Amino acid sequence: MLECTNDVGGYIIDTVIRIDKLQKEVVNEESGCVSCEQSLVARAYNTIPVSFTSCCGNPFTANLNITGDVTQFFRIESVRDRRFVTLRLLEVEDCSRNGGQEGRRHRDLVGTNNTCILDLKCCGLMQCYEAINVGHCNA
């Protein structure tokens, strides 16, 4: 059997810690460009969505509810012992756009009340997405 472990002192954990810090500081300051390495664009953006893949190449997902719906998008909430990260689950929702074309839809990530904890020792890949403001659909 393949053992899925990773050196937790590496680049992924450093990036997770940096994103956690940036998201917590976003209320206090405005800064430049967005990426895993840069700050959030402005106060309007409070989240850098992320997804993870295990060292074995399996996407990390978590249950959104008891019906089995899952997500692979998360907001970093906190980091403990440079290893365990608490993640807020982000849900993909369709929201109506009322400007321009009637009935046009777009997809947004919205925050849920659900969290999970990921052991970064089992993480082999992390992907960062464009900064967003996690909120609710305004239909």
Image (cartoon, rainbow, N blue to C red):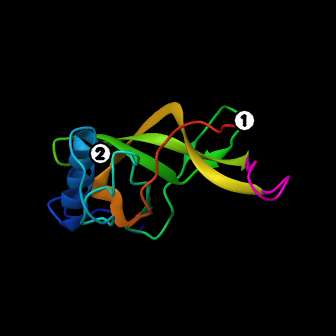
Residue 62 % position (x, y):
54, 45
Q: Residue furthest right?
A: 103
Which residue sits at x=25%, y=40%?
24
Of residue 32 and residue 69, the one placed in the foreground of this image is: 32
Residue 124 % position (x, y):
34, 67
Q: Is tag 2's residue or tag 1's residue first in the polypeptide sequence?
A: 2
Q: Secondary structure at mark 2?
A: helix
**Residue 54 visible in the shown view:** no
Q: Residue furthest front?
A: 100
Q: What residue would you read off at disc 1?
A: 67
Which residue sits at x=29%, y=54%?
120
Viewer-nearest of discs 2 and 1: 2
- Tags 2 and 1 touching, CB below 8 Å: no
In this rendering, position of residue 30 left or right of residue 117: left
Quadrant of the drawing holding the N terminus: bottom left
Q: What residue would you read off at disc 2?
A: 23
Q: CA distance from mark 2 to mark 1?
A: 31 Å
Question: What type of secondary structure mainly makes up the magenta span?
Answer: loop
Residue 102 % position (x, y):
85, 53
Which residue sits at x=19%, y=64%?
7
In this rendering, position of residue 19 left or right of residue 47: left
Residue 20 % position (x, y):
26, 46
**Residue 25 position (above or below residue 113):** below
Residue type of the residue flagged with mark 1: Thr
Sort mark 2 into few (<14), some (14-19) or many (20+) by Cα contacts within 10 Å.
Answer: many
In this rendering, position of residue 57 left or right of residue 20: right
Residue type of the residue flagged with mark 2: Gln
Q: Write the start and end of the magenta stretch as one range.
A: 96-104
